[in-house]
Image (cartoon, helix red, strand yellow):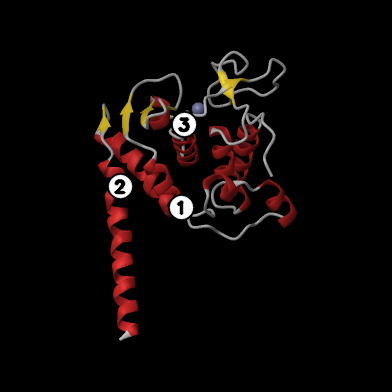
Amino acid sequence: MKGLLVVLLLALLCDAGFAEEKHRTDREIPKFGMTPAQESVFEETITAIGSLEPKKVAIGAPVYFRLTRFARLFGFSFDGQRLRDWLLRRMKSVTHANTWTIATNDNGGDFTLGDRFFEKSDFLERAYALIHEARHSDGGGHPHVRCPSDFRQVSAGTPEIDVTAAAACDDESDGAYAFQSAFLFELYARDMVDQQEAGLLYNSSVARVLGKQKK
Ligand SMILES: [Zn+2]
């Protein structure tokens, strides 16, 4: 009898899980100004994020444990499905507009995706851009600050901007660039995509985090 109760309870819990899963999918997010092809690019990106299964760490343990921040920032260990849900909870709508950058989010979860998102970006760039923007849905939006005047990095993805003139750095250690970096670092460390591309993107992303990392 007890066994049956446990089974019933488990079935109920599983049902609740599925209900929550069904509650929000990428297809249910209102989309504006997007062509069917653009909707597919967006949906495929979300699906691909959800299917990122954590591989074994493929770099030295001391380096990994010194630099990994994913679990501390996101609140769960690296896992594509949980990351996808984390992302979708922070997206209210998606609009295509020819913005100056790959993507924006006004802090309310209304995302704008620029031409660059659809035409000039690969999966990795689209994925980290969405994760970056999703962090702007939290709290007061985690606004950026200008990079310091002696900042020596350029914006490889948006060469037309001067990062010391635009707000393109974070003075806090848990802003959008920290989340973006933590995601890229896991893909690099676990060798899940082009490792060199992930490593280079991690390096340039983490340079934007000016605030001291909390232990
Ligand atoms: Zn941002």
Side of 23 where 202 appears, left or right:
right
Instruction: Identify residue for label 1.
Output: 80
Q: Quadrant of the N terminus?
A: bottom left
Mark 3 → mark 2, Cα distance in angstroms:
20 Å
Instruction: Identify residue for label 2.
Output: 25
Asked if the residue at label 3 sits under 8 Å from ligand 1, the reply is yes
Mark 1 → mark 2, Cα distance in angstroms:
14 Å
* Residue ID at (72%, 50%): 63
- Residue 106 figure quarter: top left
Q: Residues within 10 Å of mark 3 (few under 14, many from 20)?
A: many
Say what amino acid the circle numbered 1 marks.
Answer: Gly
* Residue ID at (34%, 84%): 2
- Considering the numbered disc 3 on the image, is that residue within a helix, a strand or a loop? loop
- Considering the numbered disc 2 on the image, is that residue within a helix, a strand or a loop? loop
**Res 29 label:** none
Say what amino acid the circle numbered 3 marks.
Answer: His
Instruction: Identify residue for label 3.
Output: 136
